[in-house]
Amino acid sequence: MRILARAAIAFSAAIFAANYLLPLPWLLYAAVLSALMAAGLMLPGRKWLRGLALCLVFFSLGLVQFQCYHARTVARAESCDGGTYTIYGEVTAYPAVYDSYCRLELRLLGEELPKAKAIVYDNDFTGTQLVPGDRVRFTGRVRMADKLYGEDYDGYYSRGIYCKITAIEPVALCQQGGGLRYLPVKLNRLLAERIGGLFPADCAAFMRALLLGDKSLLYEDEALALAMSRAGLMHTVAVSGMHVVFLVGLMQFLFGAGRRSALTGMGLVWAFVLVTGASPSAVRAGVMQSLLLMAPVLRRENDPPTSLSLALALILLHNPYAAASVSLQLSFAAMAGILCFSGRIYGWFCARWKAVARRFLLRYLIGNLSTTLSVLVFTAPLTALYFGYVPLLSVVGNIAALWAVSLCFMGGWITCLASLLPLLGQGLAWLCAWLARYILLAARVIASLPGAVVYTETRGLWPWLAASYGLFILCGLFGKKNWLRFGVPGLATVLSLCLLLRCTAWDYAKGRETIAVLDVGQGLCVAAMAGDSTVLIDCGSINSPDNAGELAGRYLLSRGRKSVDTLVLTHLHQDHSNGVAMLMEMLELRQLIVPAMAEELPVDIQDSARRYGVEIKYISADSILCVGEKITASLYAPAENSRDNESCMAVHLELGDYQALITGDSPMTEELRLTQEQELAGTELLVAGHHGSADACLPQLLAELGGDTAVISVGFNSYGHPAEETLERLALYGYNVYRTDKDGTVEIRIG
């Protein structure tokens, strides 16, 4: 079995090297070199090196597989990039309908494009009634699927999607779908509707995510999704080995164990994997569980490392670009941690506490603790890298909730089956709902605790993380006593993190004043901090995968801020305000200031303000706002007859002797009015208006300010922001220009 493991690991290592390390033109040369080295090791008299030769052979095969797959898919898609083609394909998922377009997913069947999946944007909404299996034809413009909001993005490739197609004529149905190929997708849809009808509204989204892995509705509840993430419980709604184990456990509880049960269990496992979408984590769990079930049937011993490595190799054989899947990386990292450390940690506790073996509750606690700590070993750096945070209290979350998750999962499926008898199904759904409510309550409580998460925006976090891992490795290699191998590095890690967070909070509370223009993409959010006082100007973004409120919350929390005194909205366009509701979920907001002539506040902001008791103040005339001892904000109300961007309020900030002007989206007419009516001389910082558009940064304004620093808050856009003429004007008047799309968050420490 271990020979298979070595071959699978070598093959997978080649795929990861091709994804992240080796340039594409070098792959065939590297494959040939690896094969030649393997041949040399196979010479007579070198039998002890044949294991290494086997690894080199499969490493070479992995490189060749990646090269061939790339030629069949990505290379063909690249040759069609920007062209217009007649598209013929098969619908693989139900359409997703949004405000301005309908989104389809196709399996391309034509000769000109690669035989792969593609995303189709149907702006005419002609494909809204399609179902999986339907075949369609239309004319469309093809683009590569390697970008998201202007940034390199490999998430589509990891799902086997290599083209984005914009339909330029109606999507025409050629043939209605049929057959069994898309039965799992249709069954998923039926089950989702059944779950939505059975369970109460406050837990239906969670149950749908738990049973089917469909988190779309869960993410719509921003507060709930945030709480689950901060409590380290989001993994419970990502289909993985845990769910498969629950499913097999339920089947064996109902029907007993044995060979026949093992074969039935395999069929049930793969039905579950397919119905839930066959994500990499689900496929990994399916392969490993199948090998575990087959071991007694074939009278072979199950070998978890072989199962894990084989599952990875099979997934990458099907799609080498799946190596970039976050789901895959986290799933395999978690399982690797469990295999390497869980048994050792559990054994260490059992050796010291003899009562563990006799008491069920203690076994549960120690087992849960051992598994969670093992999972964190490899997943913590990945979580920090991809999601920007580390859930420090995930151990507490798992201990508090996993027992309920297992019961809720099994009870949820029993409820779906029992719903064939309506009264029985409704009764069981009522019981399951209380378990779900307990899990959600636990997530919210744990997420609200101090120190629940630490964000990567915290200065020095990455060096701390690297130093902590280095210390554990050194003590593990050279320490002979368990207190030295685990106790010393564990205590040093906790104390150093507390010191790091405390010093960061002290620096921003007692140190220099700070103004930061946050990198929220095509939007605006400016933070001003002095002493214990915090003021935000705007909080919104468009054309960005991240919510501006979450980005602002992470920035402030990483600086030791747990509340915002005042949030001033210059106006209510989405790129300046659509993150406000999320911000209220993350921090305490005391006051929200809005121009009186602005349109009505969005419903989500009103609901959040009402729920958290936020005071809303409307400004109809120029006002001065004093926050704490060092922050003064002059609010310049727009002209009475202004509209659209002209109804934008400008803000002049003073932090001690330092001055900054934020004009929001004010056009040149409003900027000219400011120079005529206000005293702005000596303003050092200008946050350029309207993301640096051509009608911003009036010469008279630049001359009046006399500053030296300008920041343009801008992201991916189709408007041409920032305009060349604006950049030239700023340079002409001696401004040093910083851009959030190139420089990231621009933080200015004063003094």
Image (tube, helix red, strand yellow):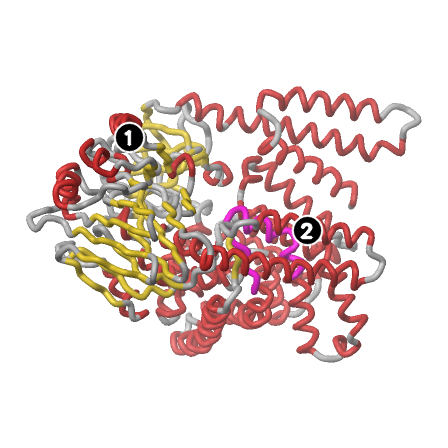
What is the x, y in percent for residue 478?
82, 52
Determine the CA span between mark 1 and mark 2.
46 Å
Q: Is residue 738 left or right of residue 469?
A: left
Question: In the rendered image, is residue 171 in sight?
Answer: no
Question: In the rendered image, is residue 268 in sight?
Answer: yes
User: Residue at (24%, 50%) from the top-left corner?
Assistant: 651
Magenta region, residue range: 373-393
The secondary structure type at the circle numbered 1 is helix
Q: Residues within 10 Å of mark 1 (few under 14, many from 20)?
A: many
**Residue 214: quarter of image:** bottom left
Question: Mark 2 and mark 1 in contact (Cβ < 8 Å)?
Answer: no
User: Residue at (74%, 50%) from the top-left corner?
Assistant: 473
Q: Is residue 132 left or right of residue 17?
A: left
Q: Is residue 34 left or right of residue 186?
A: right
Q: Which mark is residue 469?
A: 2
Q: Nearer the viewer, mark 1 or mark 2?
A: 1
Is residue 374 in the magenta section?
yes
Q: Amino acid at mark 1?
A: Leu
What is the x, y in percent for residue 747?
42, 45
Q: Amino acid at mark 2?
A: Tyr
Please tell me which residue lies in front, 612 or 105.
612
**Residue 91: quarter of image:** top left
Image height check: is 350 above or below 722? below
Determine the residue located farthest toward the left in the rendered image: 641
The secondary structure type at the circle numbered 2 is helix
What is the x, y in percent for residue 167?
29, 33
Q: Is residue 261 left or right of residue 621?
A: right
Please tell me which residue lies in front, 588 or 678.
678
Q: Which mark is residue 730?
A: 1
Q: Main secondary structure of the magenta part?
A: helix
Q: Residues within 10 Å of mark 2 (few under 14, many from 20)?
A: some
Is residue 556 in the magenta section?
no
